[in-house]
Amino acid sequence: MARAEVLGPGAPATRREPAVAGRIVSDEAAVGRRAAGSPDWALIATVLALTLIGLVFVLSSSFVMGQELYGDPHHFAIRQLQGAGLGALAFLLLARLDYRRLRALSPLFMIVAVVGLMAVLVPGIGIEQNGARRWIQIGGTPAVQPSEFAKLAVVIYVAAWLASRGDAIRHLTLGLVPFSLIVGFLGFLLMAEPDLGTGIAITAIAGIMFFVAGAALRHIAALTVMGGGVLFGIVAIAGYGLDRFTQFVAAESDPEAGGFQVLQLLIALGSGGLTGVGLGESRQKFFYVPSAHTDGVFAIIGEEIGFIGTILVLLLFAFLAYRGIRIAQRAPDKFGTLLAIGIVTWITLQAFFNMGGITRTIPLTGIPLPFISFGSSALVATLAGAGLLVSVSRFGVGRIDDGGVVARRGQDFTPRSVPRDAGGGS
């Protein structure tokens, strides 16, 4: 009798339940039986390194402001350490969880995310700061930024939604239209805060997941055109974000006001030279760089540990992206593949937006640098996402470099169960 097995070329044989010669055990059954293996330790080490770098540079970049505002130079560092503790707990719990259990809960996550995004607009609950309502606070509890957790909820929900649709996502009425309505509704809520940067990020993350799931290229093109048109309309009609674009293209024309932040970030980044002025020795953090511990922390890294330090951070994010893509390729089902792609896109896209703004490659977006910028909500949400990525890695199959599990865009990455001795009994 043949034995059905899940294996790639060159993989060792593992016994499965008896089957008639030539019969293929269903993909879903094979996935359901698969036990968890070892996590991706390289990914875990990368996440740990980025988080530790963040703790060090939040302390270094924020002690001046902490002393000025709260009389405690360690104020922001302590809060970030608390966020890291909560994030580490979320990371460990989700890394040990079978990520497939979240698929059925994805609508609940989405509902909670929508409620959170609406709550920031409610007087008495939402907190307004710098003309935007992005935080909620009830009583004496710490303020929470719902949009950061919404990113994780959107990735889980969109991954489950796309995986359940299968080839139907290539159809206009079953794929593009409902997908556009989902993303458009979230974008509307974010613009009501307003938070253009997060709106762009979530739209881009969902769009890339839509592409990887196998959506028709003409639909991807239509989404891109529609998104660009909406963005242009928001900037042209409402004027929101226009100041940041103006600062990007003409900072030198107003160095004392509109272009101040852009130019000071570049000065901080470049003044470190090759090896930096020394850890803790930044001069730009003395109120020259606005938000030095949040959006501008990458510039302080460049100033204190130089070009070498910034390259190290870039390489860590690049390696995280590489490991994440490998995890997506080895995921045992389409939900796992899309979940991994969504998380990797979320982290690396935010890193690009942040570092691109500081280096003046793109306009400033106000998006934090994952794992590194100050912000407890962002740190907890990002570590939770990284934990889910580790969970997917624990159920990976085959070896990509041996050709065990490779799929084209839109295919289900579930490994096929292959009869070992198709021509005879055992």
Image: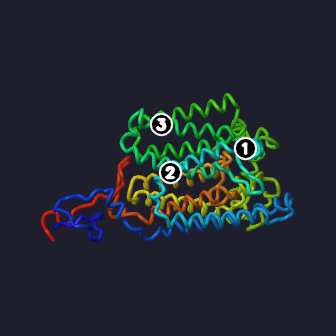
| In this rendering, the label closer to the viewer, 3 or 2 | 2
Note whether 247 is above or below 38 in the view shown: above
Tell me the tag on residue 178: 3
Residue where numbered disc 1 is placed: 133
From the viewer's perspective, tell me whether residue 361 is left or right of residue 69.
Answer: left
Q: Earlier in the sequence, mark 3 or mark 2?
A: 2
Residue that badge 2 annotates: 106
The reply to whether callout 3 and callout 1 are in contact (CB within 8 Å) is no
Q: Residue at x 82, y 61 (%)?
A: 66
Residue 305 in sight = no
Whole-angstrom CA distance, mark 1 to mark 2, is 26 Å
What's the amino acid at mark 1? Arg
Q: Amino acid at mark 2?
A: Ser
Q: Residues within 10 Å of mark 1 (few under 14, many from 20)?
A: many
Indicate the secondary structure of the residue bearing disc 3: helix
Q: Give the CA distance from mark 3 to mark 1.
A: 28 Å
Quadrant of image for the N terminus: bottom left
Number of numbered markers: 3
